[in-house]
């Protein structure tokens, strides 16, 4: 006697209820087994009708009818799996991505070079000129943040909801120097160097190089301050709008800063090294370099064979200055001036080349204008004296001469005002004192406005050589404050290498 | 202030223009004789006219008379070599407000302009 079909049916679920399998054990009447009957039986177990696979029911019922002694199993219902949410992400802009690729490529190329191999010219140029850093400007777009998504819930074969998981947030954190706007765009808050890793984005307005400036870094041109822990190698360039500090030795390189320059390891330029400091300079030593300093200059050890122009004061009471040419616009305090062995050491005190040149040129031009005005006046007076009755054209000529004379007088007044201001500016921007704390060696040459002073024999310090208020060179014992005779130690001659700027009184009387 | 310069000599006009420039007057129209001036004065509507006497086509005195006959009250200064007293009186009767004899210094011309404008302002 055949069993009730329901007793022969068993429903199995797998994959967390996403799959429903029908198992039909023998003992049933094969005539009863149709797709429709099986559907009704399955639905009675709670399987949602929309997930039932009709084709599968047809197939299994055919098998049952064909062989009622075997156990038959088929997948008859499939639910909908949940779609879990996507995780948050950060995508850099195309510009930043390109820079990242360039830096990565550059790094690989460097690593692939054999140790000790010579670089050809193209490679040298490439590695120097390509920076290993990404510099960004304030408000520049760095990339876009995409938030995580919620996902889509699924259903098991019984119609129960299988909740989708929300995607995890991005692993990247926003560090200092960046902000996110309302469109989820990450932007730089300041000009600076971009630091981008898998966990953090930040922009720093100081570039910190933990190492040397060499082929690994390339040249540096940065809007912020730069700090380098080690050396700067030959022929590399460091440019900054902020302060530059170099921990190691600077070799035959170029350093340019709009602000202060600090050379903790000194600079040995081998006559090729150059620096420019928009502010002050502090250095351990300088050897065979050329440089310009707009602020105060402090060297702790020595200055050898350099070409220096310092618009501030050189304040190095423990240092030695040997060889080369040094301009100290606001005076100098030095330990030892000059050296033995015939080295010539040239120092120019209180020299401001460009304004002095302008004063000279203006004074020359004033003389020309004065001469021309005098000529016009003389002609005018001559015409007035000689004419009893003027014709119209003579009256015109006279008017023209009056006009020319008047114009030149006005021009002279204007030039005098301007050159007086310029002279005042030169006076207040220069100081004419050289303080030597230990000694000045024979052969040292010091220029002051209007004079050249040569050290004839070693001069022991502490002494001051200065241009006095009387316009003469004085030698002062620093300890006592008393003047010393100059004739033994110094040779003083008139010299116009540094122009003696005229006094306001002499300018007025010349006019 | 708009100033019209009427003189047949370009040199004189340049000198006067330069002096006026130093005084701050840069809106200037030039005419080379009385006829030329009459054709331009209506459109330019100057606040002051500097006029020479001896010019071709129409001399300065004729221009002054013609201009005043049109009920124009714009201040006028005659700038001329004519220095005789009778000539000065003739010019003033014709309608000029002031008189400068050539050769003149820039300061003198400046003074006359200031005087003239000052008097005319008071009269209004």
Image (cartoon, coloured by chain):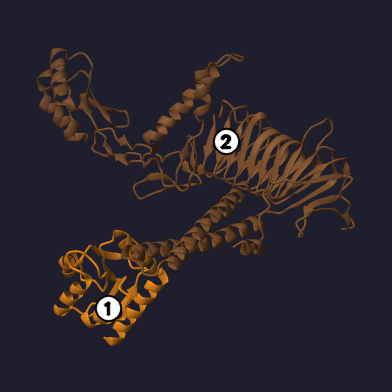
Chain colours: A brown, B orange
Q: Are marks 1 and 2 on the same chain?
A: no
Circle 1 — which element? Answer: helix
- In the rendered image, residue A14, in percent from the top left (x then y), is placed at 31, 27
- In the rendered image, residue B19, in percent from the top left (x then y), is placed at 37, 66
> A453 or A86, which lies in front?
A453
Residue under label 2: A238
Q: Residue at x 59, y 53 (%)?
A: A359
Within the image, what quadrant is residue A165 found in?
Answer: top left
Circle 2 — which element? Answer: strand
- In the rendered image, residue A332, in percent from the top left (x then y), is placed at 75, 48
Up/down of A139 relative to B37, above or below? above
Up/down of B108 relative to B28, above or below? below
> A181 or A189, which lies in front?
A189
Residue under label 1: B87
Up/down of B38 relative to A321, above or below? below
Left/right placement of residue A449 relative to residue B46 reads right
> A334 or B47, which lies in front?
B47
Mark 2: few/some/many CA within 10 Å (<14, 14-19, 20+): many
Q: Residue at x 11, y 23 (%)?
A: A34
Q: Chain of mark 2?
A: A
Left/right placement of residue B124 relative to residue A344 reads left
Within the image, what quadrant is residue A85 found in?
Answer: top left
Within the image, what quadrant is residue B113 found in?
Answer: bottom left
Quarter of the image with the N terminus of chain A in it = top left
Q: Is residue A162 visible?
A: no
């Amino acid at each position: 006697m055949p069993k009730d079909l329901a007793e022969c049916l068993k429903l199995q679920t797998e994959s967390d209820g996403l799959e429903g399998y029908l198992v039909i054990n023998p003992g049933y009447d094969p005539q009863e087994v149709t797709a429709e009957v099986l559907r009704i039986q399955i639905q009675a177990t709670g399987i949602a009708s929309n997930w039932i696979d009709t084709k599968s029911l047809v197939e299994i019922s055919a098998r049952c009818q064909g062989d009622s002694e075997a156990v038959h199993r088929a997948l008859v219902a499939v639910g909908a799996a949940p779609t879990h949410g996507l995780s948050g992400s950060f995508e850099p802009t195309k510009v930043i991505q390109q820079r990242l690729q360039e830096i990565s490529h550059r790094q690989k190329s460097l690593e692939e070079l054999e140790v000790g191999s010579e670089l050809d010219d193209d490679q040298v140029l490439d590695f120097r000129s390509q920076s290993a850093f990404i510099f960004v400007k304030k408000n520049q777009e760095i990339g876009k943040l995409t938030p995580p998504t919620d996902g889509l819930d699924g259903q098991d074969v019984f119609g129960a909801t299988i909740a989708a998981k929300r995607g995890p947030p991005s692993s990247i954190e926003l560090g200092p120097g960046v902000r996110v706007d309302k469109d989820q765009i990450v932007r730089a808050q300041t000009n600076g160097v971009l630091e981008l890793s898998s966990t953090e984005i930040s922009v720093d307005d100081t570039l910190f190089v933990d190492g040397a400036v060499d082929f690994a870094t390339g040249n540096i041109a940065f809007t912020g301050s730069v700090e380098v822990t080690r050396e700067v190698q030959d022929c590399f360039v460091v440019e900054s709008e902020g302060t530059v500090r170099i921990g190691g030795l600077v070799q035959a390189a170029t350093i340019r800063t709009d602000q202060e320059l600090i050379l903790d390891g000194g600079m040995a330029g081998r006559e090729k090294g150059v620096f420019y400091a928009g502010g002050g300079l502090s250095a351990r030593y300088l050897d065979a370099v050329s440089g310009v300093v707009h602020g105060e200059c402090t060297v702790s050890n020595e200055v050898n064979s350099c070409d220096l122009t310092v618009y501030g004061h050189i304040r190095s009471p423990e240092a030695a200055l040997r060889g080369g040419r040094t301009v100290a616009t606001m005076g100098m305090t030095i330990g030892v001036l000059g050296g033995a062995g015939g080295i010539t050491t040239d120092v120019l005190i209180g020299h401001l080349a460009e304004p002095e040149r302008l004063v000279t040129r203006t004074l020359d031009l004033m003389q020309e204008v004065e001469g021309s005005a005098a000529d016009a006046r003389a002609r005018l007076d001559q015409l007035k004296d000689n004419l009893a009755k003027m014709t119209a054209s003579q009256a015109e000529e006279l008017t023209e001469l009056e006009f020319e004379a008047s114009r030149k007088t006005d021009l002279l007044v204007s030039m005098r005002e301007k050159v007086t201001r310029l002279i005042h500016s030169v006076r207040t921007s220069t100081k004419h004192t050289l303080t030597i704390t230990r000694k000045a060696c024979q052969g040292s040459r010091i220029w002051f406005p209007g004079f050249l002073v040569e050290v004839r024999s070693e001069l022991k310090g502490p002494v001051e050589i200065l241009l006095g208020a009387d316009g003469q060179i004085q030698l002062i014992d620093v300890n006592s404050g008393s003047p010393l005779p100059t004739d033994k130690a110094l040779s003083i001659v008139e010299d116009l290498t540094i122009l003696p700027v005229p006094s306001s009184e002499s300018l007025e009387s010349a006019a | 202030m708009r100033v019209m310069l009427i003189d047949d000599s370009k040199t004189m006009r340049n000198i006067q223009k330069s002096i006026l420039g130093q005084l701050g007057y840069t809106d200037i129209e030039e005419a080379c004789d009385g006829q030329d001036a009459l054709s331009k004065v209506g459109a330019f509507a100057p606040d002051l006219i500097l006029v020479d006497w001896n010019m071709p086509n129409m001399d300065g005195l004729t221009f002054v008379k013609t201009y005043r006959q049109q009920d124009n009250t714009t201040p006028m200064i005659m700038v001329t070599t004519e220095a005789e007293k009778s000539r000065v009186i003739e010019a003033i009767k014709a309608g000029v407000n002031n008189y400068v004899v050539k050769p003149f210094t820039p300061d003198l011309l400046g003074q006359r302009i200031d005087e003239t404008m000052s008097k005319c302002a008071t009269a209004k």
